Structure formats: structure tokens, C-alpha cells
Amino acid sequence: MRGMFSLVAILVTVGLMMYLFAEHTATISKTRNEILPQVNQFSGRDADTGDAAYTTAVMEPVETNAKLMAVRVAKVSPGGAYEKYFGLMVGDTITSVEYQAVQTPLRGKDLEDARLEVFSAFQRQGSLTVLRNNQQMILPANGSDSKNPLSSLQQQINAVQH
């Protein structure tokens, strides 16, 4: 009889431990799925493919008197990191980048530095100033990107400034 109570107590304890472990694992899995896109972006990777973001676009220099003025997007990988986050299109001319509330013109940099600035803007969830069809615009175009945790903060800052 005592053996039966001991066996039941052990089975109940094991069952309770399995239930708690399952709850904990479900919470961790949900949290992981929520933050993984941000972690990939901070590390400079495409959330879907894991490819380095800088490989998803080819940029060429726009020069005047042998000085870099901007970079033109020559090729964009369909569904790549730069297309998804910034909305970059072939033919866009990137004139400056902004991240951490600092706008950096690409004028006067070399091509590799300009590419690194664009990559840094991607990692830090910044923005690009581009010329598209002779119109200046800021990308990402929708300032309310739901995957961007800084967007609500940026919206508050913009509301105070205007």
C-alpha cells in the first residue's frame, strides 16, 4: 500500500514537472520567434535566408570630378534584405544614410566606405536618403515598420520636433 502511494506521488511529480517544462519551453520558443528577426538584422543578416545583407545589392559609384557623390543601386536581390527593409530598387541613388540620429552624406567617401555606411544603416535600423525618378525620398518609406522596435520611439521624436 505504501509502495502504491509512493509510485502515485512520483508519477504526479513527474507529470507536474513535464507540464511546467512544456510551458517554459513554449514561452521561450515564442520569445525566440519574436526577437529572431531583430537579432538577424542587428547582425547584418537576412532574416529568412541568413545571407549577409550587403550581398543583396550591388552598388556603383556616382562621381563628379573623380569624387564620389552618391552610390547607385545596380542590382537588388528579389526578396533580399535591402529590398525588404529599405525597399531599394534598381536605379535608386543613395545620397546619405541616417542611423542613431546622425545623418551621414556619402559625398567624399570611397565606394567601400559608402557600402559600409548603407550596411550600418541596415544593421542599426536606420534610413537612406535616395533619389528615385528625380525625387528625393527617405527609405524605408513607411516610418511605422512593425518589425522596427525603434519606430515608435522615432515617431515620438518626430511628433515632438514638429
Image (cartoon, rainbow, N blue to C red):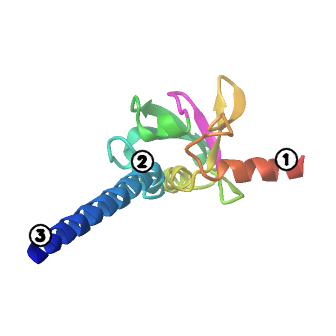
Identity of the residue drawn at 68% across and 39% down: 143
Percent x, y of residue 53:
41, 47
Which residue in the rendered view is the most extreme toward the bottom? 2
**Nearer the observer, 106 or 142:** 142
Q: Disc number at residue 4?
A: 3
Q: Nearer the viewer, mark 2 or mark 3?
A: 3
Region rendered in magenta: 87-97
Question: Element type at marker 3?
Answer: helix
Q: Is residue 57 magenta?
A: no
- Distance from disc 1 to disc 2, alpha carbons, whole Å, reads 32 Å
- Disc 1: CA contacts within 10 A as few (<14), some (14-19) or many (>=20): few
Percent x, y of residue 76:
43, 32
Identity of the residue drawn at 57% across and 31% down: 92
Mark 1 is on which residue type?
Ala
**Nearer the observer, 32 or 26:** 26
* Left-right relation of 34 to 134: left
Which residue in the rendered view is the most extreme toward the right? 162
**Image quadrant where residue 145 sits:** top right
- Reading the chain from its start, which is encountered first: label 1 or label 2? 2
Q: Please say if the residues under marks 1 and 2 sit with CB atoms less than 8 Å apart.
A: no
In the picture shown, does residue 116 fall above or below 76?
Answer: below
Q: Disc number at residue 159?
A: 1
Mark 3 is on which residue type?
Met
Q: Disc number at residue 107?
A: none
Q: Disc number at residue 54?
A: 2
Mark 2 is on which residue type?
Tyr
